[in-house]
Image (cartoon, rainbow, N blue to C red):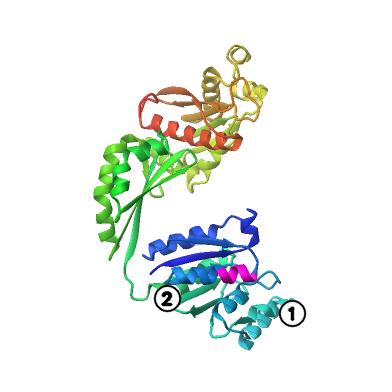
Amino acid sequence: MIVEILAIGTELLLGQIVNSNAMHIGDRLADAGLDHFQQTVVGDNEARIAAAITAACRRADAVIITGGLGPTKDDLTREAIARAAGVDMVFDEDQAGRLRERWERSGRIMPESNLQQAEHPDGCSLIANPKGTAPGVRCKIDDTWVFALPGVPAEMLPMLDEKVIPFLRGSDASVVASRLLRTWGDTESAIGERLGDLYDASTNPTIAFLASGGEIKIRITAKAATREEALALIAPIEATVRERIGKRIFGVDDDTVELVVLRMLEDHGWTLGTAESATGGLVAGRITSVPGASRVFRGSIVAYATEVKESLLGVSADVVAEHGVVSEPVAVAMADGAREQLGADVVVAVTGSAGPDPQDRPVGTVVVSVVTPEGSQVRTLSLPGDRERVRTFASTAALQLLRMSLQGIAWGSR
């Protein structure tokens, strides 16, 4: 079965809201073994929404629409479905009663505009919304099932999981499984060249390359009758990828670099601290985003100003004067100072010139130092992009170089 996603909302087109619903729905469709080839975003215009529904119905066996089911005048999804199906709108008295009852329980007076949520295209059935007031809609246009769900993710996801996905799967027991190999240290183009023949030959499994935050992810996806059979199809391709990419692979599936680092620190019985300048606490933020980080993470010193590096971290003013604040001697001194101040076994320190104006060194110059009970390493990096991209890439590089230090890998090797 081919399923298409249609997201409604001018705010999505303007970039005011990120279309996270498409990501969540795509993930659910893949897990359910349902094919998904296209997504569309349409603004709040009834004619354009109806045209998009009609076009999607020509391509897909099912269409999942999100957004446009609220009580305001720009919520036009129900009317657009009716227009695409060539039917009238009808009023559901039972749904109107449920709306009034919900508002009464909250002790508030219901604005009459909410009764718009009791209307639906003739011939459609309503999908209960346990988290909100706007019910979903299910109907058939020619041979295509059309589902309309609220745009609010907290409302949409339970309805998708409990009502839509089971309906679509029916007797189709196929499963899609993926293996995500996380790499660092090579460009997307270099990874693509190493695996180009596998990509060209891939049908089932398929291979895709995803670049984000300075890391390259290799996704291997297979479809089979069971998850075990799909994973068996993936296994030989994964083995070949690992053979070619080698130590650049640092994690699998949900194993982010921060999670990998925390596991390694626990295995060593070591604690961690950070000393950050250009990254402004991003490295510490990524570490503490992992539940249980408190078992090893001691804290962070964000020493942004030069005088703070000197007063809190003990960086010598003479070293700053001789080498500049964006330098390897300063990064090493920051790591040593934070180790003493925080009482940590391991410290990763970052200083750099993130831009837009250069500080000592060209924009994109970042220096990372890591000190462990077994020694210290330092490296100067040249990172691409604007200020935020440099900062993001710098936090990734710091965590990756920390990982390599914990593994006993010299930074000059991969």
> Is 12 rendered above or below residue 349?
below
237 relative position to 82: left or right: left
Residue 283: where, in percent of width, then height? 53, 37
**Residue at x 28% of width, y 59% of height:** 230
Q: Could you tell me which secondary element the residue under label 2 belongs to?
A: helix
Residue 32 on the magenta segment: no
Front-most of residues 262 and 355: 355
The circle on residue 328 is none
* Residue that sits furthest to the bottom in the current view: 93
Front-most of residues 192 and 152: 192
Quarter of the C terminus within the rendering = top left
Whether residue 128 is visible here, answered yes or no, is no
Whether residue 1 is visible here, answered yes or no, is yes
Q: Which residue is mark 1?
A: 112
Residue 140: where, in percent of width, then height? 48, 79
Q: Which residue is mark 2?
A: 167
> Is 120 rendered above or below residue 201?
below
Query: Do callouts 1 and 2 mark residues in contact (Cβ within 8 Å)?
Result: no
**Between disc 1 and disc 2, whose residue precedes?**
1
98 relative position to 172: left or right: right
Q: Which residues are the magenta region?
A: 46-51
Front-most of residues 334 and 142: 142
Residue 38: where, in percent of width, then height? 46, 61
**Residue at x 36% of width, y 40% of height:** 192
Question: How many residues crowd around disc 1 within 10 Å: few (fewer than 14), some, or many (20 or more)?
Answer: few
Q: Quadrant of residue 211?
A: top left
Residue 350: where, in percent of width, then height? 54, 28
Q: Amino acid at mark 2?
A: Phe
- Judged by its main secondary structure, the magenta piece is helix
